[in-house]
Amino acid sequence: MSAASSADTPSTDRPVVTRFAPSPTGYLHIGGARTALFNWLYARGRGGRFLLRIEDTDRARSTPEATAAILKGLAWLGLDHDGEVVSQFEGAARHAEVVNELLAKGQAYKCFSTQEEIEAFREAARAEGRSTLFRSPWRDADPATHPDAPYVIRLRTAEDGETVINDEVQGRVAIRNDQLDDMILLRSDGTPVYMLAVVVDDHDMGVTHVIRGDDHLNNAARQMGIYTAMGWPLPVYAHIPLIHGPDGKKLSKRHGALGVDEYQKIGYPAAGMRNYLARLGWSHGDDEFFTDEQAMEWFDLGGIGKAPARLDFKKLDHVCGQHIAAADDAALLHEIEAFLDVTDQPALDATQRDGLTRGMYCLKERAKTIPELLEKAEFVLAKAPLQPDEKAQKALDDVSRGILATLTPQLQSASWSRDELEGLMAAFAEAQGTKFGKLAAPLRAALAGRAVTPSVFDMMLVLGKEETILRIEQAATPAAS
């Protein structure tokens, strides 16, 4: 391919189509999830289409379980795709068809060089200090001289000039064509290579924007050769930096969770993950917290930085806490139930669901994860009679039990509103010659069996009059100890 010309300029007047194309060899990596999110936001914000392709040409490593894990991870994140999931492996016949077309056009050729011959060339080149880039002797050979032997089919790459990638993130990237080999398109067994399949699939799926990790940047130069040889319009490229750990090194297991499924099991809300991942390498002014609708409206390729983003769990906690606080109660309850399911915990019964729904207003404030919210909700999830923990047990001494026993009749005649309960408690504390703060500990122990809980009044309102009085009565008797 010669130096990029106007004919090589990506067309941007087509309806936006993006894609996420993971390899099904394991879980959905957090970096892959961010790539999917960027593609999803870009398409959704422009009324375009977001497609999903499973690049399963590596049959030895691709598994149905990994595909299922990827689909499950995307579903949890809320990244819905358009149309059916495309299997790259199933398009092998179409990939080969394109190669035969290139062969007929003279844009590809048969190469009969064996692996032994190629390796011998490279060894000699290394010994002599020459470039090890292999140039096939069959590139311009007369077909009449072709032997009856196995061959691969290679792309005929330009030997001079340069290939220019006008990348939306990396800027102008120029690669000399004499540094690009004639890459193999079809192996000797007739199977297509990944680099070919990606281009054919992207073209056939109508992909207009290829947004992917910058580890694919060098691949773009080689893939552009296929687009040009076929006379196809180039997509817009945007190669995004990878995610690094807090120490600035490539993300690995030592940094903690890598798979999206692990973040769900930790208890981060999906909306918080979307918000945090969007900000991981992309920015819109100083905005840190935003909704999906705002992200779709604001997201653009120009806001993506060139430097690797660093995973910061404190920021993730903070953003997720904001999303839990702002979440719709019904949606949050659904996410809690999904969390309990993936962590193999007992499902909520009808009473617990009802209690959580009533108490959500006082539970979701200042909870950064779902386990933190459930910890605060223990008072409404637990069944009477409660078994107080060690700290709560200490608050239920004989004096405190006597006070609780005295309080119960007054609660029975109270109307169940915050104002009346606060007034009643203030008057009761004064009558006892103390302050309400002194009554709070035994009340927490009675209502929740814990020393750290939401406010006493919130618990009383959520539990209701009957359950509140029952728990205080049980705590006031020695049998509760």
Image (spheres, helix red, strand yellow):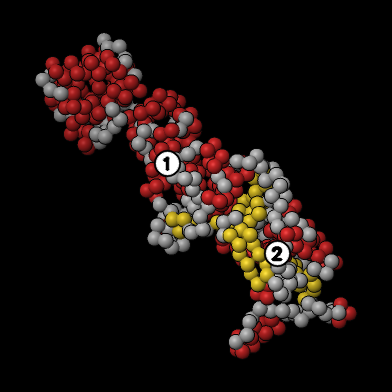
x 81%, y 78%: residue:
140
Which numbered mark, 2 or 1, is in the foreground of this view? 2
Separation of marks 2 and 1 at Cα, in angstroms = 45 Å
Up-down relation of residue 268 to residue 5 (above or below): above
Query: Which residue in the rendered view is the most extreme toward the front?
Result: 6
Foreground: 431 or 42?
42
Residue holding disc 1:
320
In the visual, does 219 lie left or right of 28? right
Quarter holding residue 155? bottom right
What residue sits 78% from the left and 61% below the top? Answer: 230
- In the depicted structure, whether residue 377 falls above or below residue 77: above
Crowding at dot 1, Cα within 10 Å, few <14 / some 14-19 / many 20+, comes out as many
Residue sitting at x 57%, y 56%: 169
Nearer-the-camera pick, 110 or 71: 110
Quarter of the picture holding the N terminus = bottom right
Residue 18 coordinates in the image, percent (x, y): 65, 48
Residue that label 2 marks = 4
Q: Provide the secondary structure element on which disc 1 rests.
A: helix
Q: Nearer the viewer, residue 313 or 294?
A: 294
Is residue 371 found left or right of 409 in the rendered image?
Answer: right
- Amino acid type at circle 1 is Cys
Count of number-bearing discs: 2
